[in-house]
Amino acid sequence: MGDERVAAEPMDRIDLGRVAVGIDMLPCLTRAVFLLHRWDGHSYKEIARRCGISIDEVEHRMATALYMVRRCCDGDRMSLPRLRLALRPWRIVWFAWHRRRRDRRLGF
């Protein structure tokens, strides 16, 4: 009985209405990636194949979705331009790493 109460407490703190609003605010492909992974339980590889994008793009879209949904749950509805601005340092690092990886594959 005590275990059931402890397991139920985290769900009590989550406002499912805010989660739904956060998911609705996502761009279409990002929402699809998020729901395929979190709702249907597909792997990143399967999502990439089904959506016709790379696994790196799936990871990027999942990070964006998690960030936006979390911000919405905290009560801060973030617009997509503000999100891009907030994630800009991480995107710069990611694109530099991706470019170096591509250059290594090409033999540069």
Image: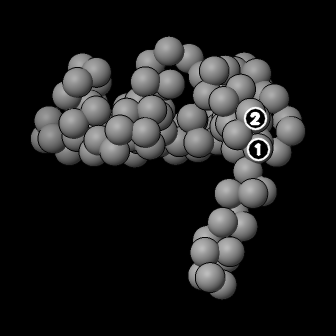
Taking the image as shown, residue 11 lies to the left or right of residue 34, namely right
Q: Which of 88 and 11 is in front in this view?
A: 11
| Image disc number at residue 15 | 1
- Which element carries disc 1, helix, strand or loop? loop
Q: In front here: 77 or 41?
A: 41
Identify the residue at image location x=28%, y=33%: 47
Q: Residues within 10 Å of mark 1 (few under 14, many from 20)?
A: few
Instruction: Please state the horizontal and vertical placement of residue 95, each as a whole percent of the image.
Output: 45, 36
Residue at screen point 37% across, 33% down: 36
Displayed quadrant of residue 49: top left
Can the viewer see residue 85 in this picture? Answer: no
Query: In which quadrant will I find the N terminus?
Result: bottom right
Q: How many numbered marks have been drawn onto this rendered protein structure? A: 2
Quadrant of the rendering where the C terminus is positioned: top left
Q: In which quarter of the image is residue 75?
A: top right
Vertical comparison of 90 with 12: above or below? above
Residue 47 in view (yes/no): yes
Disc 2 residue type?
A: Arg
Question: Residue 71: where, in percent of width, then height?
Answer: 76, 40
> Relative to the observer, which residue lies in front, 16 or 93?
16
* Farthest residue, direction bottom: 2
Q: Residue 18 carries which label?
A: 2
| Residue 33 image point, x, y percent | 41, 30
